[in-house]
């Protein structure tokens, strides 16, 4: 999850992100004669779909277009390593196309499972590098190393050109999902195009967002939640100024700040749909108040903890 710095990070400004306690699990098993991808929790019907990893083609009839979109990151991993004769099963707790790094998590989990299954012995550094490169290739060269670094290493990462692990305490946040998916690539291209036309407007906005990201580190470390909330609000306003806000996102943000009494709230991710995040006051009653406000504004609320572990091997064979 990106806490601060969306879009600005693509142009070199600082960004701050955190791994949260939502998991994506990938399992791989042998399947002689074909390659198959099953991803039943990605909100499309994918179980039993056969994919040609070298062309990216879905092998079958009457397959929804959304299935092609959901499998393109997995297919890119398989193509990179020439993987054949296997079934990949991905189970995700992260809503797809929501701004919570679902594609990065899928790529990292698939890489980890493939490394184990094929005895590639990829290190975490190698997985993070490969995952970033693969995600960028699917997104036409756009994107930062933030999400893939968080999915791999966990904790908090600050990105200023490259991603760096930073030690900060856990926080409880509330996420509000609009139910409307977004297209990261399209939103990034839109903002980059706007910035190319009006650099004298957009460059200062990006610098301000980068400054917010840097200042947020001290607020989190010192437990200055009210000040951190004000930075949430400022970052949200700057994101809306570059055109990535939507009516649905704004309704959830203002409901969180109003009836939810959150210290602050903002878009998370590329915008254009997807999710927002809110910083509740301390205590479960404040978390519940924000969640109720989001639900009343027609969003899907859930709470997360930041600074959680990244890639790991689990007990079940070939699961990450």
Image (cartoon, grey):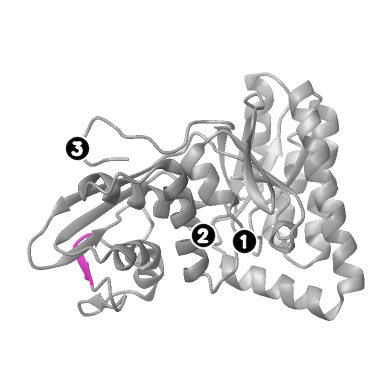
Percent position (x, y) of residue 234?
85, 47
Judged by depth in the image, the label closer to the viewer, 3 or 1, is 3
Judged by depth in the image, the label closer to the viewer, 2 or 3, is 3
Query: On residue 273, which mark appears?
Result: 1
Q: Mark 3 highlights which residue?
A: 317
Number of residue marks? 3
From this view, report whether residue 155 is shown above or below residue 39: above
> Which one is in front, 313 or 164?
164
User: Which type of secondary structure does the marked residue at label 3 adopt?
Assistant: loop
Q: Quadrant of residue 216?
A: top right
Q: CA distance from mark 2 to mark 3?
A: 28 Å
> Which one is in front, 277 or 254?
277
Q: Residue at x 62, y 61 (%)?
A: 273
In the rendered structure, the answer to whether residue 198 lies left or right of residue 82 reads right
Q: CA distance from mark 3 to mark 1?
A: 36 Å
Q: Mark 2 highlights which residue?
A: 97
Q: Are marks 1 and 2 in contact (CB under 8 Å)?
A: yes
């Amino acid at each position: 999850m990106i806490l601060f710095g969306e879009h600005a990070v693509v142009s070199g400004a600082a960004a701050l992100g955190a791994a949260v306690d939502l998991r994506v699990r990938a399992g791989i098993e042998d399947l002689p004669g074909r390659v198959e991808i099953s991803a039943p929790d990605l909100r499309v019907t994918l179980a039993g779909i056969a994919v040609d990893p070298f062309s990216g083609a879905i092998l079958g009839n009457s397959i929804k277009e959304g299935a092609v979109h959901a499998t393109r990151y997995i297919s890119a991993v398989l193509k990179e390593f020439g993987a054949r004769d296997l079934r990949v099963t991905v189970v995700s707790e992260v809503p797809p196309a929501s701004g919570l790094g679902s594609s990065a998590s899928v790529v990292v989990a698939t890489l980890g499972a493939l490394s184990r299954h094929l005895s590639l012995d990829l290190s975490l550094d190698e997985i993070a590098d490969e995952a970033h490169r693969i995600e960028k290739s699917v997104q036409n060269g756009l994107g930062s190393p933030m999400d893939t670094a968080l999915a791999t290493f966990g904790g908090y990462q600050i990105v200023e050109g490259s991603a760096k692990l930073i030690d900060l305490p856990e926080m409880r946040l509330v996420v509000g999902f609009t139910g409307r998916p977004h297209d990261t690539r399209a939103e990034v291209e839109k903002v980059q195009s706007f910035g190319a036309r009006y650099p004298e407007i957009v460059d200062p906005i990006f610098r301000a967002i980068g400054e917010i990201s840097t200042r947020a580190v001290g607020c989190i470390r010192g437990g200055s939640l009210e000040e951190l909330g004000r930075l949430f609000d400022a970052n949200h306003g700057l994101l809306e100024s570059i055109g990535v806000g939507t009516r649905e996102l704004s309704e959830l943000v203002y409901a969180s700040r109003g009836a939810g009494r959150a210290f602050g709230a903002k878009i998370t991710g590329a915008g254009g749909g997807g999710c927002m995040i809110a910083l509740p006051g301390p205590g479960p009653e404040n978390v519940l108040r924000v969640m109720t406000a989001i639900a009343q504004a027609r969003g899907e609320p859930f709470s997360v903890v930041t600074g959680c572990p990244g890639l790991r091997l689990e007990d079940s064979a070939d699961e990450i």
